Image (cartoon, rainbow, N blue to C red):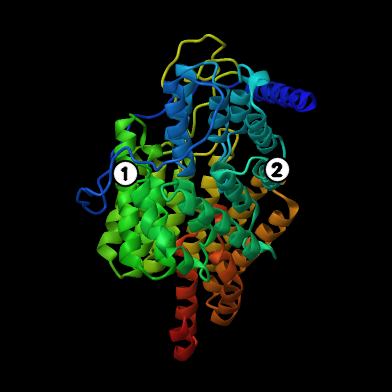
Amino acid sequence: MACTRAWLLIGLTAAACSSRDAGEGAKTRSEPTSVAPAKPVAAAPDDRYSAGALGALTFEVSSGSPEARASFNRGLLALHSFWYDEAIRQFDAAMAADPKMNMAHWGAAMSRCKLLWGEDDLRAARDVLGRMPHPESLSAREEAWVMAAIELVREGDVRASRKKFAAAMEQVHAQFPDDESATFLAIALLSTTRPEDPDTLAVRERVAELARGVHKRNPKHPGAAHYLIHAYDTPDLAAKALPFAHDYAKLAPAAFHARHMPAHIFSRLGMWDEAIASCQSAWDASVAAARREKLSANHHDFHSLTWLIEMNFELGKRKEADAALKVFETAVRSGLGHQHRAAYAAQVASYVKRTGEPARVDDLLAALETPPANDAAPVPAAGAPPGAPPGAPPGAPMTRAEPKSHCAPGSTSSPMELLEQVSVLDTRARAASMERSLPKTRSFIAELDAANAKLRPFFETTQPKDVLVKTDEAHARRRAALLARAAGDDRALLKVLRASEADAGSETGGESNPSGFVVQEEIADTLLRLNDAKAASAE
């Protein structure tokens, strides 16, 4: 025990020092005022949903006032549904209610790590862990949980840290088997696997087994339903998750991501109406939550909004798809961060492909002429109270902080401006290739290559080499498809599109996307131009 405590204190000290080093020179950023764009589709109130419902769970802690424990519990429930805004608010509230509550710091740190997307604010996570008031008083079980968190927030590439965290959670679950160690082990395992891994099916089935066990003991646990849906979010496995897809939004309706997740399964199974209803509900809930907490439009669920665009196209509902895209365009013109702007540009690329209207690309991208809103505010300096202004010294007065939400901008260290530039250039290259303008396509590809070259150092320090190799291969296929399309070489285009199907179907960052169907549709269009209607109909 003494050795474990020594390593724990060393880890927490290192975390605090790392956070202070990273935080030097940080400047205060401001968020724009809240924007409430019009809804793409009118949604009637749903009486099944209770505004405060997040599910139910039990996590034993050794310290904390009743008020602090209640906030801790709600924060953990929100975390299981990836409602990071609410999780951070609640863990901060727990620290404010009882500054001596150690595990509130653990929860606040975990809320800065978006396990399935790699969008981690490690500086903030290390900072809050380093401010844990009395680590020497942690129970043996709590020590194990904190040590696992320290593994997660260490320096290193994203996948390596995920694997270390999963190994640590294996130990936690072996020593202290309960529903929470099972669910955190499940999400930790999910965060380590990729579609191309040889053991991905075995990992997914183990995650599902862990989730089913928790669900059997506690049907109201949000993590059980959520992580099982992610485990089975593949074409071959989706049907297994259908009962959980029907239940998840009902047990945690306060979290907009819980309303969105069933769409993953519904869309896999061609249940488009149900998927659209899920995403509409998620969008509405996210807008309402942002209004309630006085947060900017950066906290709206644009992920669900893009799904509304794509899925309405799948049903041939052009009017509804246009309306949803207009909502996104209006929000961009009102001020969004670089990550949302990049997503908008990518959505324009999908839109011009689906509509066959590349001539509209300039008009649609004109919204990006509006200056971007700041992506995210830096975290307070180490030792500052929860909610202190960015860069504030210990003891600074508290103000409202704006933690990031699902699909909100990444950390301030992320090269989001370059990513937006890449997205815009890719969209323009797509439109030029559709217009069969080979010179323009080549010009945009050259600019795209230059922008990607600037991004390369960042990815080399954050991604494993095997991921970089696969990314380079996907970029090469993308470039070849653009040139073949621009040259009108349908046979070459078909060959590249066939090779690119796996790229479109993969789960980037744990989120499948119905825009992947665009590749299959383009294959069918290309086959028709090659007078192979039989093969086209099979697509």
Whether residue 366 is visible here, answered yes or no, is no
Q: For this rendering, which residue is in front, 185 or 60?
A: 60
When the figure is inspected, residue 496 is found, relative to residue 349, above or below; the finding is below
Judged left or right of residue 389, residue 370 is left
* Residue at the disc numbered 1: 285
Q: Which residue is mark 2?
A: 171
Q: Indicate whether 290 appears above or below 317.
A: above
Identify the amino acid type marked 1. Ala
Residues marked 2 and 1 touching at CB (< 8 Å): no
Q: x, y (%) of residue 386?
A: 50, 20
Q: Amino acid at mark 2?
A: Gln
Select label 2 or label 1 by which is in front. 2
Give the number of marks. Answer: 2
Residue 152: image quadrant is top right
**Helix, strand, or loop for circle 2?**
helix
Q: CA distance from mark 2 to mark 1?
A: 37 Å
**Image quadrant containing the N terminus:** top right
The front one of 86 and 489 is 86
Viewer-nearest residue: 266 or 407? 266
Picture layout, residue 53 above or below residue 270:
above
